[in-house]
Amino acid sequence: MIDTPSLTAQDALCAMMIAVSASDETIRTAELVKITNVLNHLPVFADYDSDHLARVSRTVLDLFDQEDGLDALFGLIRDTLPERLYETAYALACEVAAADGNIAQSELRMLEEIRYELNIDRLHAAAIERGARARHVTLD
């Protein structure tokens, strides 16, 4: 087991975004751009040092390499993130999944796991998902 560094609530939100992006084994440029935009523009990240993103990314990817790493990741998230930010974490994960215009099966499974692990109400999840889809629609 790797020595997992402690996370802040903002790190936990970043971890969710990285996890959904990496769930298909490819972190796409559009997903990285979305994460960067989120860090630069959302109020929850107003005082966040974006240099932490590299450390959080390493932690998530290291956990993905372990047999029970996903369980460990969700344990870290639940231990760190206030429950009032669970829907925010899910919304950010949906934004990243939708960023490249194609949500892979592995990303859908990860979103399902996030809903389950963070106990996101199905109706609330559907509204969050629909909003992410609407924001990422293209003309062609």
Image: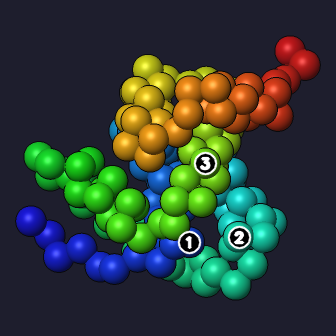
In the image, residue 2 lies at what x, y percent? 14, 70
Check disc 3 and report the residue beneath it: 87
Residue at 71% across, 60% down: 38
How far across and down, in percent of the image, does residue 93 sit?
A: 57, 45
x and y percentages locating residue 27 in the rendered image: 48, 45
Question: How far apart in space, not on screen, are marks 3 and 1 (Cα)?
Answer: 14 Å
At horizontal 61% and vertical 38% (from top left) the residue drawn is 94
| Circle 3 or circle 1, nearest the eye | 3
Query: Would you call the spot at circle 1 few (<14 residues within 10 Å), some (14-19), or many (20 or more)?
Result: many
Disc 2 from disc 1: Cα separation: 7 Å
Q: Looking at the picture, which amino acid does disc 1 mark? A: Gln
Q: Contact, CB < 8 Å: mark 3 with mark 1?
A: no
Residue nearest the observer in this picture, 140 or 7:
7
**Residue placed under numbered mark 2 in the picture:** 44
Quarter in which the N terminus is drawn: bottom left
Instruction: Determine contact: label 2, label 1, CB under 8 Å.
Output: yes
Task: Name the image quarter holding residue 129.
Answer: top right
Q: Earlier in the sequence, mark 2 or mark 1?
A: 1
Left or right: 104 with respect to 69? right
The residue singled out by tag 1 in the image is 10
